[in-house]
Each structure stands twice: as structure tokens, then as C-alpha cells.
Image (cartoon, rainbow, N blue to C red):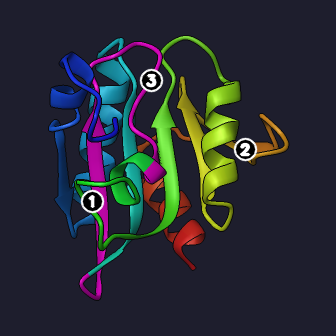
Amino acid sequence: ASKGEKGRDYWDRKLYTTTNSVYNAANVFLFVADNTSVEWTLKGGYMDGKRTFILGTNNNRNRVSSMYGLTKVQEALFPTFIPIIDIHSHPYNPFASPEDMDNARLLRDIRYGIYYKDNIINYTDQNNSTYSIKVNSMNDLMRYIFQQLR
């Protein structure tokens, strides 16, 4: 949401937090993604020189704030965050939407993925499904995150 936008989406953006623990980030993300019907995000990178994970939701079944929206807009929640990985859940389908791909176009050097029913489907600004991996446990998700952060 930009500074000029008003209403529910702007305030829902406040439902974001950070942690330096990949364990906590993976644990919370899998729990909320598997047990709610709204989109959630887990973004990994660096803030103030420390590995940091952003977790959050807009309480919406079809959208969650993009990396660009959280870091680059005026009054961004995390303007100093340096992103590397951006995962978000899709409650109802495994493919990146046209909006997801448009957002990937804004920040191309980030690795993007959709979490859907025990899978992570990677995508780019050009392809809504490049490859997928099975996520059977929190350890699988943590392994995936570490691989992407290299």
C-alpha cells in the first residue's frame, strides 16, 4: 500500500514482524500457512548486518504485501531490509499470479517461491513455475531457506 492508500489494506500491513531465527520463522510460517485460508509471507535477507526474516499477512485470501511494498515505497515498514528470498503461501493454487510475476519484475535479483500444500514452487518474472520442492517438515523448509540464502 502506498502512502496515499487508505482503509483496511493499509492497516493490515501492520501485521508484519521480524526475527533473526530461521527456526522460528520456518515454524511460524508453516503453522499459519497450513492452518489459515489467507496468504502469508516469509522473506529472508539482511537488516542492520544481521540475517533477518520478515513474517506477515494482509489477512487476504488472494494477496500479501510484496517485497517492493515492504521495502521501497514511501513509509515502508522495512526500508533497510536487503532481500534475498521471498516466499508466500497460496491457499488455493500452486502458481504465481500475474501480479506475483509483476512484483518479481520490480526486484529481479530475489529468489521467489510459492508455498502450496507441502510444496514450494519457484517462479520468476517470466515463468509462473520454474521448479518445485517437497516440504514435508520444518527442517525441509529451513534447508530450502539456507540453500536460497547462499
Label total for image: 3
Residue 85, x across and y down, in percent = 52, 60
Q: Amino acid at mark 1?
A: Tyr
Pick whichever, 89 or 109, lies toward us. Answer: 109
Q: Which residue is mark 3?
A: 63
Q: Nearer the viewer, mark 1 or mark 2?
A: 2
Q: Which residue is mark 1?
A: 23
Residue 126, x across and y down, in percent = 84, 44
Tag on residue 47? Answer: none
Say which element carries label 2. strand
Q: Residue furthest front?
A: 4
Q: Quadrant of the C terminus?
A: bottom right
Say which element carries label 1. helix
Q: Which residue is mark 2?
A: 123
Q: Residues within 10 Å of mark 3 (few under 14, many from 20)?
A: some
Asked whether, in this view, residue 110 is left or right of residue 131, the answer is left
